[in-house]
Amino acid sequence: MQTNRPFEYLIPDSLTEVVVPGMRVEVPFGRGKRKIQGFVMQVKETSDFQGKLKPISRVIDLKPVLSNEMLQLSYCLADRTYSFQISCLQTMLPSVMRAKYKQYVIPLDKEDEEVQSLLNGKETLEITNQLDDITIRLINRLRQNNKIDIQYVVENQALQIKRQAVTTDLNVIQLHEAKSKLRANAKSQIKLLDFLAHHLEELPVELNVLQKEFGISRSAIKTAEKNELLQIIEVTKLRKPVGIDPEKTTKLKLTEEQHVAVSEISAAIQSETPQTFLVEGVTGSGKTEVYLQTIEKALQQEKTALMLVPEISLTPQMVNRVVGRFGNQVAVLHSGLSSGERYDEWTRIESHDVKVVVGARSAVFAPLDKIGLIIIDEEHEASYKQDDNPRYNARDVALWRAQMNHCPVVLGSATPSLESRARAEKGVYRLIRMKKRINNQSLPHVKIVDMRDSENSAIKGDFSPALKESLQTTLQRHEQAIVLLNRRGYSSFMMCRECGFVLKCPNCDVSLTYHKDLGKMKCHYCGHEEPVPRICPNCKSKKIGFYGTGTQNIEQQLNTLFPEARVLRMDVDTTRRKGSHAKILQKFGQHQADILLGTQMIAKGLDFPDVTLVGVINADTTLSLADFRASERTFQLLTQVSGRAGRADKTGHVVIQTFNPDHYAIKDAAKQDYETFFKQEMYIRHQANYTPYYFTTLISVANKDEGQTLKQSYWLKKQLETSLSKDAILLGPSPTMISRKQNKYYYQIIVKYKHEPQLHQKLLEILNETQADAKKGFTIAIDNEPQHID
Ligand code: ADP
Ligand code: ZN
Ligand code: ZN
């Protein structure tokens, strides 16, 4: 059974001073001989435990793997995400540290007598559980005095890159003596000894480098080795993420708006104020330059900086901008890295080799210290929230770390989340608006195409005459186009092709979804169900049906319409292989293609000067999501993708095809008018009691037996009712979108509330009580402020 309770153990005399918080240890647990891994949370002089304390068996780490900050964070994280502290602690570490690896002693002070005796003439010493306590204590003391370091090496040999390198134990005088003894015609030996004498400080040097860059032959090296003039050793070369070698960039001269943003944020960095800024800047307003110059400010203050970006926009373009400015002071953490590479980056951060970390969600746990600035780009992105345990939102973790580090947080977006924008409205966050594009370039011209009208409803494929014509013009001008197929939604909602009507729940104002197993339309929030309509309830047309098209199909249509155009397709299928995402973008960037066709993944962060047209095939899909954020997601997507057009000197055009041309999310996105959208959407959220007016918690129950799942769900609902006031709204239990996954039935309960002081405690109790049920095959998940409801 999992628990959040810490357990007390005795530190054996042999391990006093060795055991410190943040280390992992092995301890006996329970009655049998079972040993488990634990994290040292705290070291105390005395214990209140009544019985006899068991001793720690051994230490797993010889240096703490988690800082005090991270240990503190784990308490809050477990509490806030209704998860177990142990899973929070593990989430903070790179995955290889959960796998098998070895630890080695690396000498830092080779002259030290104790170091020499420890290593006993060897280059390193592997730390195994065979080592006696005296040795462990010695290792610990030497490490604290910076005479040695401990390095983790993943056991999987393939992950290590070992290189042969040359070093020497002779000093300059000895090298010269050796040289004078050589015959004058031993040219290559002389060259080698000269090299060593001149580069003593830089040794060891890789054998490869010596051969390739300094023209010293392998045989010369071998001869010198035989004569004991040098030694060949193995070194572990730190891997560097691939494909990063951008040109160095320098500071741009800031525009007026950028200048205001940079100076406000810089002032907070300087005064160490944990203020949160919301930078609401239209697409192309130059937010990245604001990030770069404020990061520079933090570095000038001898601090570090953390920048989070959504995985999907962790494109080479974005990474290059940061690495181009700060070079090898930057560590990049993204899902394309192997676990070994990820671990290397983690080590570089932990050992203070880097000052700037750029990464996706989990990078928020990067072991940086003295953080001077945290940036969250595209702060509205749902991917900052983890869908599995612990269900944390990187945005919350960032705010917490900012408090601990006394540093500002910058949330940046052209389309902020309603939660953040509402907080700015209340003065909790400082709002900085950037309304103009760089060079005063106008926002793109957007044309909304009404797919219901006679001209368009008659077309065979998915391209309206207006979009076809715009594509034609763009191709003729040798400019580029981006075509978005909005596919986030599932084809399980119903829409009328005659009038754009979408079938919605009468209680919840979200779309109903089709449940195949029931043959009915159902609401995920409250469980309301009704039969599948045969005719449109709005206009009586028979053209009501399920909705959805694939990218491959659109690609074929493009090939038929424009046989001469070069089309690149980017979707989950074409980007499965490592690096393919980057390759497609590179190709497009070099204008080796005319049209980039893709799903949501092409909507963000791309900055290509030749793109003058953006076409959106189906704006309505996200609008029909069975989620109260459907309008927000649609507005964000359309604004972001439109923002890809006309970023350089040429004006951009956007064509949006929709069956709902009068919907405010579409109309406001066409004008790139966030503020108007915000006001309208806030009104609707207020009417329907949704975020940010209400907090939301989602509790889901799963079991192989549907009857049991329902029973458990109703029991949970009863439990919750006892602790809630009459102002809270309890919805469900209702089946989730796919009510049966891996042979388990899923039901969910939604709590909407404003102020329920007892709810948190109750949920923690439920979490603990239902532990026993886990054995019976129940899974219970509590999701605080869910980003998707399905
Ligand atoms: P955003 O992220 O706000 O959409 P970007 O940061 O991508 O916008 O900036 C848009 C373009 O403007 C980029 O090509 C960038 O290099 C350029 N840019 C940004 N700031 C300046 C500046 N001060 N002077 C000139 N060009 C700039
Ligand atoms: Zn209709
Ligand atoms: Zn409903």
Image (cartoon, grey):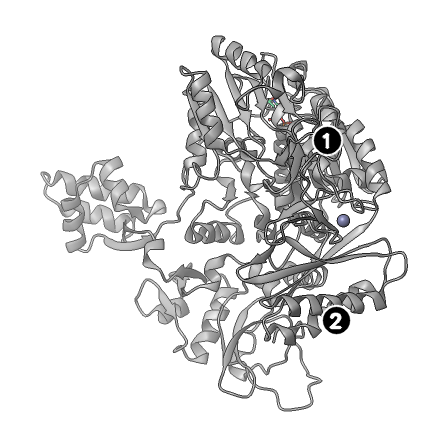
Question: What residue is shown with label 1?
Answer: 540
Q: Residue 769 at x, y = what percent?
A: 70, 74
Left/right placement of residue 98 relative to residue 295 reads left
Identity of the residue furthest to the bottom in this view: 51
Q: Secondary structure at mark 2?
A: helix
**Residue under the point 72% across and 35% down:** 631
Nearest to the observer: residue 295 or residue 229:
295
Q: Residue 181 at x, y = what percent?
A: 14, 47
Left/right placement of residue 312 relative to residue 451 reads left
Which quadrant does ligand 2 occupy?
top right
Q: Residue 742 at x, y = what percent?
A: 53, 60
In this view, 335 is above or below 104: above
The answer to which image quadrant residue 453 occupies is top right
Instruction: Tell me the distance, in whole angstroms, between the alpha carbons under discs 1 and 2.
Output: 51 Å
The answer to whether residue 303 is seen in the rendering is no
Query: In the rendered image, which quarter contains the N terminus?
Result: bottom right
Q: Residue 80 at x, y = what percent?
A: 72, 59
Left/right placement of residue 722 relative to residue 169 reads right
Residue 493 — which label? none
**Residue under the point 44% across and 53% down:** 339
In this view, 315 is above or below 757: above
Q: Are marks 1 and 2 in contact (CB under 8 Å)?
A: no
Nearest to the observer: residue 537 or residue 500:
537
**Residue under the point 86% across and 41% down:** 687
**Amino acid carrying mark 1 in the image:** Lys
Nearest to the observer: residue 649 or residue 132:
649
Question: What residue is shown with label 2?
Answer: 765
Q: Which label's residue is closer to the chain start, 1 or 2?
A: 1
Q: Secondary structure at mark 1?
A: loop
Nearest to the observer: residue 290 or residue 17:
290
**Callout 1: CB less than 8 Å from ligand 2:** yes
**Amino acid carrying mark 2 in the image:** Glu
